[in-house]
């Protein structure tokens, strides 16, 4: 009752009769360089691990563990004794959290293969944190008396644990990606800002270079009278902290003005400046007000708005 020319073949065989080529009826997968069938024991384990790793409940559990781990890091302080109940509780929590993070990493690697897992930048960060945390935990358990500088690096890397929270919150990932994409434009803007600060710093050096000095004794005005002892204490001719004596402190001073940190007092100190050998005199150069205001507007507001524009554009 078969039509002429029809061909029959057994399931799992191709029309040519060769096994394993039946148009994907039994698609094979690779897990850590080992080929396995989805219907086999390994394939079922892989599928189970994938279901667990991608479940919303497991993701919430890991988020909770990240929060708890971050809180324990915040609680840490040198005053906690080695044998105190707080220390023991923190150590137990640390072991449990590390176990959960290791389990998550294992499930993802086992279900996806390490090659696929490690392609993601966020997974690389997770893997780095898990590995360094495991090494740090192993050192604490098996070699607590060993004190090497390289071991301190693993403790420092524990501070990266809160970053795992970013990898699981979409809005935070978008924010992190925006910051990452803005790195090059921000660097270019930073060079521009440095150029602006340098220009204003050079201008200030021409106006106030070496003039914002005074004697440690406020009753002394001249440099010559400042160089002696009073009641066994030597007088010093010192510069105002925010000064423009040479290019580096000049750029730093312009940056301080741009941040508007206590800028009225810095401006008044510049206005009171007289000469390199005499101390300040009130309102000696009132015209400098315009120059200070211009610096704050251009070096401060303009540069800050450029930075904001870079981030918005990214």
Image (spheres, helix red, strand yellow):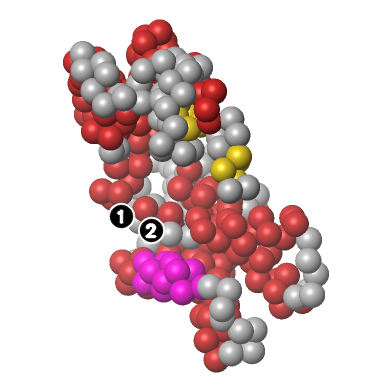
Q: Residue at x 53, y 81 (%)?
A: 90
Query: Callout 1: 10 Å neighbours few (<14), some, many (20+)?
Result: few
Residue 165: mark? 2
Quadrant housing the C terminus: top left
Task: Tell me the crowding category of disc 2: few under 14, some 14 to 19, or many 20 or more residues within 10 angstroms, Cα based.
Answer: some
Image spot of residue 205 (x, y percent): 42, 13
Q: Position of residue 12 (x, y in %)?
A: 50, 53
Whether pointer 2 and pointer 1 mark residues with C-beta atoms closer than 8 Å, the reply is yes
Q: Nearer the viewer, residue 111 or 151?
A: 151
What range of the chain is rendered magenta? 63-76
Q: Quadrant of residue 147?
A: bottom right
Q: Is residue 80 left or right of residue 272?
A: right
Q: CA distance from mark 2 to mark 1?
A: 7 Å
Residue 15 visible in rendering:
no
Q: Secondary structure at mark 2?
A: helix
Identified at 43% across, 21% down, the residue is 278
**Quarter location, residue 48:** bottom left
What residue is rendered at 43% in x and 59% in y?
Answer: 162
Inspect this view and state whether residue 173 appears. yes
* In the rendered image, the vertical position of residue 151 relative to residue 95, given as above or below: above
Magenta segment, prevailing SS (helix, strand or loop) = helix
Quarter of the view holding residue 309 = top left
Indicate left or right for 259 with 35 as reference: left
The mark found on residue 169 in the picture is 1
Does 166 appear above or below 60? above
């Amino acid at each position: 009752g078969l039509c002429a020319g029809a061909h029959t073949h057994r399931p799992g065989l191709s029309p040519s009769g060769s096994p394993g080529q039946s148009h994907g009826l039994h698609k094979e997968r690779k897990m850590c360089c080992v080929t396995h069938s989805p219907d086999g024991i390994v394939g079922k384990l892989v599928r189970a691990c994938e279901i667990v790793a991608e479940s919303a409940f497991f993701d919430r559990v890991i988020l909770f563990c990240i929060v708890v781990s971050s809180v324990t890091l915040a609680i840490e302080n040198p005053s906690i004794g080695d044998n105190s109940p707080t220390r023991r509780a923190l150590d137990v929590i640390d072991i449990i959290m590390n176990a959960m993070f290791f389990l998550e990493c294992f499930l993802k690697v086992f279900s996806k293969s390490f090659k696929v897992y490690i392609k993601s930048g966020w997974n690389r960060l997770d893997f780095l944190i898990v590995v360094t945390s495991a090494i740090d935990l192993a050192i604490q358990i098996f070699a607590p008396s060993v004190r090497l500088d390289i071991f301190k690096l693993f403790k420092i890397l524990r501070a990266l644990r809160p970053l795992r929270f970013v990898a699981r919150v979409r809005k935070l990932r978008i924010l992190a990606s925006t910051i990452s994409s803005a790195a090059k434009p921000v660097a270019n803007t930073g060079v521009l800002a440095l150029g602006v600060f340098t220009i204003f710093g050079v201008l200030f050096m021409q106006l106030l270079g070496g003039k914002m000095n005074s004697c440690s004794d406020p009753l002394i005005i001249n440099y010559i009278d400042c160089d002696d002892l009073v009641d066994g204490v030597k007088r010093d001719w010192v510069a105002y902290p925010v000064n423009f004596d040479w290019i580096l402190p000049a750029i730093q001073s312009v940056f301080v003005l741009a941040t508007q940190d206590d800028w009225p007092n810095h401006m008044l100190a510049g206005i009171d400046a007289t000469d390199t050998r005499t101390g300040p005199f009130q309102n000696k150069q009132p015209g400098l007000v315009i120059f200070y205001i211009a610096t704050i507007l251009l070096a401060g507001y303009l540069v800050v708005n450029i930075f904001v524009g870079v981030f918005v554009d990214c």
